[in-house]
Amino acid sequence: MNEAALEYIKSLKPAPHADGKALVREGMALGKTLTYGRSGYLRTQSKYKSHMEMKMDMARQGKIYWNILLGLATLDEQVEAIREIYRFTERTGLTVNCVQAIPSGLVALPPEYRENAPQTTSFEMYSQEDYDVQEGAAPIDVTFNDYHLFSPNALENTIRAIQAGSPRIGDMTQFFWGYAGFDDDVKRFSDVCRAMGIMASKRDEMVAAETYLDDGYPGYFLDCASYVGYALLEHYICTALCGARYTISFGGLLSENDTRCAVAMALNELMSTEEQTVLTYLNSSTNLQWDHDIHGNYGISVPEMLFEMLVEKKYHMGLGINPVSITEKLRVPTLEELCNIFAAGKRAEEKADEWMPYFNFAPLEQMRDVMVREGKKMFENTLEGLKAAGIDIEDPLEMFLLLKKMNPIRFEQMFHSSTYGTESREIRPFYPTVLGRQTVEMKEEVTSALREQGFEQPLTGKRVVVASGDAHTYGLVLVEGVLTDMGATVTNGGVDMDPIDMLDLADEEDTPFIGISCHNGQALDYARQLTQLAKERGKEYWVFMGGKLNAILPGDAEPTEIAGMLTELGIHAENNIAQTVAQLAAL
């Protein structure tokens, strides 16, 4: 490993802290006092002892496991929607195996921190009853993943999810996320270690710590093989250091059928056992959807799901499917839209067996083998490099604190087999990620169009600070690249930047120009906080926002586009980076 990488890792080494394994043991002791609940499905049948047993049986039979993400505006609407999904399955005979609850991001925070945090879409939860009422709404299992096991409120949320009977609790990769107003990482990850101990105490009951790879480090990666290497690292921390079970979902940022399925095949080969599959579901990809003539999105979604079904029927991995509504590019989907895309996928499943004799799996197996080989190399490089830098790789708290501070782009650059031990940071992907390639292509398209309009580095001399108000990054990478190509000096504050930190960064860089990316429905609340803080400072800033500029307004159940409301607050909300460049150039 080169000296620069070693020095970088050494600079991130956590200060002395409690013994992470001792904290895990504390959690295990606490977990043994908790009763694991009975999920909605298990309460109504006697064939299976656990959700995992049902899933493994489906895999052996070549049946497809179906998962639906659901996050409505209020808890009452959420519960009624779970019931309506079950009524839909009874009416159509199309079985939904699991509903994954997507609550408000405020759930990640202890209650005393929520009032001052930016409001987001989806329902909030405060009590054990809020969990139980969802799990018991219908004979369908409900899982609690986002904002739970690795959040600042990890301990309380994990206890409630366990007692409600959630078969999986997540989301591990979200350890990387930050949350407004909460910056005590030692407290947060100490509780995470205890929560992982609780998960370990329920290992025999087949409860699993879930990850969604695209929400964390892999969302920044250039190589699909890096997904596998990183997942091996999470698996090591979860199973070897904490003693818990580990399961994986992914796919929203991977839109090419072959790489999506080859990654799944590699993960399965490396981490699944006869007792449990490591795979939960592939999320339908979202980066190829149209934001116009949206029914055309069925043309992308249905064959993608069919491809995945064929791979699952061939290899019996327990790879489920999470269908994404054709409106995903525009807004949070309605219940009807979720049922529609699920029904489309289920009807495609009826024809899957007819395709099997005509499908050649050999190219996928070749890709799988490369990803297995290179993923193992990246994992081994990671442990070797961290150990060489003085990191205690056997302490889960040390590992969490380190990885929270590490730049994920730098992570891949340091440990990828094409760069490990060299001075180079230029990764040579074995199988490039689509979104990474698309972001570069989009940047080149925008900058080329601007140059054709006569703009040759018009922002020279201007300093701009950019950051994301949530955990999404590719829009941020696009904006930073375009502004830099146009001559600006850009400071990237990264993801999960609070409004006050955004203004502090602008002040530190001595610039009024601020760019913010938002996707999780918090744009309006974020803008209000930002403008109020600016007013209190007596300063004027030139702020532009982009991404998904929507919010759930009082009295509404679905998000509303709020670009006009942002404009009234003095925010530039055209959501068009080329137009933003032209505006900045005129100042």
Image (spheres, rainbow, N blue to C red):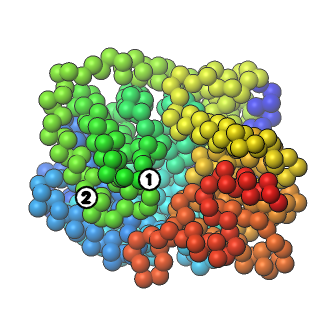
Q: Is residue 116 visible?
A: yes
Disc 1: which residue: 291
- The quadrant where residue 528 appears: bottom right
Question: Left of 491 or right of it: where is 211?
Answer: left
Total number of numbered labels?
2
Mark 2 crowd level (few <14, some 14–19, many ≥20, 10 Å Cα):
many
Element class at badge 2: helix
- Percent position (x, y) of residue 582? 73, 53
The amino acid at mark 2 is: Cys
Mark 2 or 1: the one toward you: 1
Residue 61 x, y percent position in the rendering: 16, 36
User: Relative to the observer, which residue lies in front, 550 or 467?
Assistant: 550
- Examine the rendering and report whether any part of residue 204 can be seen: no
Residue occupying the point 54% across, 52% down: 174
The residue tagged 2 is 339
Q: Is residue 38 above or below residue 553?
A: above
Q: Is residue 347 above or below residue 580?
A: above
Q: Residue at x 63, y 33 (%)?
A: 412
Q: Residue at x 76, y 44 (%)?
A: 455
Q: Residue 386, position in %: x, y?
A: 68, 33
